[in-house]
Image: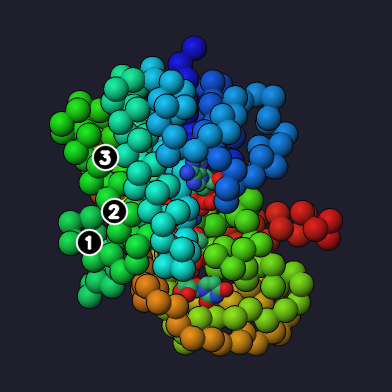
């Protein structure tokens, strides 16, 4: 049976993708070192998958797992902008050396297509919104450089080593299982935890920075489409919803949904923070059949229900 590999499959987005692949009847192997991810994210499906607890920086252990795989979804990474500034060495190792290893193992092991989780952070602060794939990248943080380099490798492995690759630039993904417990966690997971605990969040900067928040199931659907689309090898596509909300708007919306009044606190802006982010989704719609289904508010409600359920509320 064809093997489908998900690196980072014990993480937030990876574990959602694993569930979608199982629903399609695929044989799924997860590669994860359980650093930012957790085996709990795969709990009720643990006996239906094979979990390889290994570091993508360890080529000798990685290569035999990837060799001959039908599809490789490469999501393993240390996914935080501020973490890549506070502690740059591990981010560089996982996000650059690890990604190179995945592409190399796939090429040498004659695997099928590699679908790479790239990041909208590659754009940095562009003058024009929405951000289109043809714009020159302007990374503002080590993390953004690292994810961009992975894209370049994806493209070059397609050109030079006949490995099929597709890169998807995810835009601020949110949804169930996003870990809210670290200071480096995604902002919506932190906002929702604050909301359910009736605490004020801290917004870094004036809160007028904006993001194209994208619900995880829409990203998973696009990953599956990108794994089968024809004529796209070596290309990079935006994987966003196409909208844009400021943090102030988002916190107001969450308070309205929950029926509470909890003014946010404000702290200094983060170094390396992108000001505004919004995807031009035309290329993904045209070439991959991207069709986001979840409005921001729908996604927020579903996610909030999930966090509530986790707390037995
Ligand atoms: P996550 O931290 O939940 O998942 C990443 C997974 O990779 C974790 O399970 C972690 O244990 C694993 N991992 C990290 N380093 C590893 C290593 N060296 N070897 C093996 N496994 C390792 O984060 P996520 O939000 O699910 O992100 C998944 C991917 O999507 C990442 O590549 C990230 O850069 C990318 N991305 C995420 C977002 C977002 O908004 N969440 C946006 C753009 C891109
Ligand atoms: C996020 C992803 C990154 C991805 C990128 C794509 C995470 C942890 N990071 O980066 O992997 O590649 O999108 O665009 O998922 N903020 C607060 N208060 C908080 C936390 C954050 O105000 O408690 C602010 C940040 O300063 C930033 C915004 O919220 O302005 C979003 O931050 P964050 O969720 O960390 O995501 P990005 O840095 O955009």
For mark 1, give the secondary structure: loop
Task: Tell me residue 310's x, y (percent).
Answer: 77, 54
Visible residue check, residue 20: no
Vertical comparison of 226 with 310: above or below: above
Q: Which image quarter holds the C terminus?
A: bottom right
Spatial CA span between label 2 and label 1: 8 Å
**Which callout, 3 or 1, points at the residue further toward the start of the chain?**
1
Visible residue check, residue 36: yes
Q: Which mark is residue 154?
A: 3
Task: Tell me residue 106's x, y (percent).
Answer: 34, 27
Question: Neighbour class for label 2 at 10 Å: few (<14), some, many (≥20)?
Answer: many
Question: Could you tell me which residue is drawn at 71 percent across and 85 percent down?
Answer: 261
The colour scheme is: rainbow
Q: Is mark 3 within 8 Å of ligand 1?
A: no
Per the image, the residue denoted by label 2 is: 148
Q: Which mark is residue 137?
A: 1
Question: Could you tell me which residue is drawn at 26 percent across and 40 percent down?
Answer: 154
Classify residue 11 by image quadrant: top right
Question: Could you tell me which residue is drawn at 68 percent across and 81 percent down?
Answer: 200
Q: Nearer the viewer, residue 198 or 37?
A: 37
Question: Neighbour class for label 1 at 10 Å: few (<14), some, many (≥20)?
Answer: some
């Amino acid at each position: 049976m064809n093997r489908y590999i998900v690196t980072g499959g014990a993480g937030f987005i990876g574990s959602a993708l694993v569930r979608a692949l199982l629903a399609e009847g695929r044989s799924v192997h997860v590669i994860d070192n359980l650093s930012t991810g957790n085996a709990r994210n795969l709990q009720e499906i643990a006996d239906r998958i094979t979990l390889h607890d290994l570091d993508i920086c360890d080529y000798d252990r990685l290569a035999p797992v990837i060799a001959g795989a039908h599809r490789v979804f490469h999501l393993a990474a240390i996914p935080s902008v501020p973490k890549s500034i506070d502690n740059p060495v591990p981010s560089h190792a996982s996000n650059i050396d690890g990604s190179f290893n995945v592409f190399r193992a796939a090429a040498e092991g004659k695997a099928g297509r590699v679908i790479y989780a790239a990041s909208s952070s590659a754009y940095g602060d562009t003058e024009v919104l929405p951000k289109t794939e043809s714009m020159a990248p302007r990374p503002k943080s080590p993390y953004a450089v690292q994810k961009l380099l992975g894209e370049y490798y994806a493209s070059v492995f397609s050109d030079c080593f006949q490995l099929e690759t597709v890169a998807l630039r995810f835009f601020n993904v949110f949804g169930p299982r996003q870990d809210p417990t670290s200071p480096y966690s995604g902002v919506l997971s932190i906002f929702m935890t604050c909301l359910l605990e009736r605490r004020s969040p801290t917004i870094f900067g004036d809160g007028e920075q904006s993001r194209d928040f994208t619900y995880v199931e829409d990203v998973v659907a696009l990953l599956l489409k990108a794994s089968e689309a024809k004529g796209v090898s070596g290309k990079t596509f935006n994987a966003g919803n196409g909208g844009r909300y400021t943090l102030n708007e988002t916190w107001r919306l969450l308070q309205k949904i929950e029926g509470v009044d909890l003014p946010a606190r404000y702290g200094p802006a983060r170094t390396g923070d992108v000001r505004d982010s919004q995807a031009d989704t035309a290329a993904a719609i045209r070439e991959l059949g991207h069709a986001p289904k979840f409005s921001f508010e729908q996604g927020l409600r579903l996610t909030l229900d999930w966090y509530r359920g986790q707390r037995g509320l």
